[in-house]
Image (cartoon, rainbow, N blue to C red):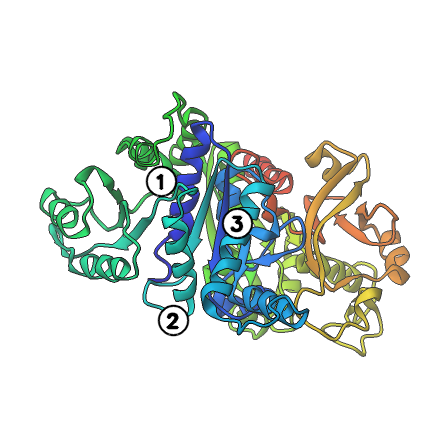
Amino acid sequence: MSGLGKGIVSSSIGKILQSKGYKVIPIKFDGYLNVDCGTMNPFRHGEVFVLDDGTECDMDFGTYERFLNINIPGTCSITGGKLFKRIIEKERRGGFLGRDVQIIPHLTDEIKSWIRSVGEESNADIVLIEVGGTVGDLENGYFLEAMRQLGREEKENVLFLQLTFVQSLAPGEQKTKPTQHANKLISSMGINPQIVICREHEPLSKDAKEKLALYCNVPKEAIFDDPELATIYELPIVLEKQKFSEQLLGTLSLPLKDKDLEEWRAVVSKIKNPKGELNVGIIGKYTAVKDAYVSVKEALVHSGAHHGVWVNVRWVEASEIEEGKVKVEDALAGLDAIIVPGGFGSRGTEGKIECVKYAREKGIPYLGLCFGLQMQVIEFARNVAMMKGANSTELDEKTPFPVIDILPDQKNVKEKGGTMRLGAYDCIVKKGTKAHEAYGSDKISERHRHRFEVNPEHIGRIEEAGLIISGTSPDGKIVEMVEWKDSFGISTQAHPELKSRLEKPAPLFVALLGAALEKKKKD
């Protein structure tokens, strides 16, 4: 079923293999016919994750990168749309002359070729393939067939792993029948899982494990618990306690290298044993779907572990402030810091601007991400630079002060998918600023996903009023970072949350929590 945690399990397996000295590259297949996730609504699909090369992909890629601490290429994201587009383009070029192009063997061969090329290009020891959706879905059937074929080819060493949900109707009353049926369905497709991982609310009983071993045709040692945990980053440790790597590598006939998750355990321990806590508000308009801001939330976990504190996230719905349902001072009461993340469209923007104004006036540490930078610039222009009615042309085409405008190279773009300023771009950071202090470098690289930017025609007046331009593109034409003079308030046009890792937290998030802790001490 969806939301079972396939991405977290795949990432945990990757981390375990990585800790044993193996180089791992993950691949994710999504059955939808979109070429990528770029045009999907966060309410339906959660966060759109952006890779260095600009690929807009499934949020599971964020989990992969956060666990494995690597930058993944866009070729690791396979969708139904990409596959069919590739096959049709090949057919139009005459790649299948004289043949009627079919799902088998042409599409399945294309899938196998794609997977092999990713493994070769990344020089990986092991390729981890996560098949999205649910077994039995029409949309991933052809991909599962390709995996079956891959598994029977002599030159390949392939292991199949089933992730399943074992429900407890009451404490101690576990039902294994749904898993048995699911396993039977997979087996009928010619795929026989050699390891079964069970998502559950309580550890498997001896009786449940014996039933699963009998009906799923695997030894008891190949059945593993995936219980509810305080943090997702604990799962590799929990699996290793059950001797997962021993079973996995033994089945693959690969050497079990004498290495451990020692460093990983140390960081996870910081998450589980904090010395204090902070309350951080995320001001958004997709707050009903927490997956829409998952990278922001995880970046707070990483930076919290760095400072040894637990971060309590409060979701603040900007549209409720905008509509007058909630007063801004009530919405932000008790918060040690606030974040305005990325977004599109006008709904909730005035509520976000009110939050930025309140944070600036009350000295609450503030971090703006992409759209959050634009909100900070608009608020400062209106209330400090006295540019009445200042706005973004995305929100008000007739604004007298278009302090935010569409990127020049975006004005004639007609297609919506994959056409924004996407991927990693360099930024020159101004010395003597809070941004420079956070990064400790004159030149940085962060990932982007936007069409609009600070309008250079109005930068001068805004700077004169006191807003600091602390980061620009190397040619100086695009404002990348801004900050307040008198208190901690930094925004970036980039999405630094996308490169935050448990072992290497995003510098601006670390700085935000550092400022919040300092303010808390003084208060």
Question: Where on the picture, by quarter, is residue 221?
Answer: top left
Q: Amino acid at mark 2?
A: Leu
In the image, is 69 to the left or to the right of 163? right
**Measuring 18% from the left and 40% from the top, which residue is drawn there?**
219
Q: Earlier in the sequence, mark 2 or mark 3?
A: 3
Give the number of the mark in front: 1 or 2. Answer: 2
Secondary structure under tag 3 reads: helix
**Measuring 43% from the left and 42% from the top, which residue is drawn there?**
155
Q: Amino acid at mark 3?
A: Gly
Q: Amino acid at mark 1?
A: Leu
**Residue pointed to by mark 1:** 235
Secondary structure under tag 2 reads: helix
Label 2 packing within 10 angstroms: few (<14), some (14-19), many (20+): few
Q: Earlier in the sequence, mark 1 or mark 3?
A: 3
**Residue pointed to by mark 2:** 138
Q: Which quarter of the image is occupied by the N terminus? A: bottom left
Q: Earlier in the sequence, mark 1 or mark 2?
A: 2
Figure check: 195 above or below 4: above
Label 3 packing within 10 angstroms: few (<14), some (14-19), many (20+): many
Figure check: 51 above or below 351: above
Residue 343 in view:
yes
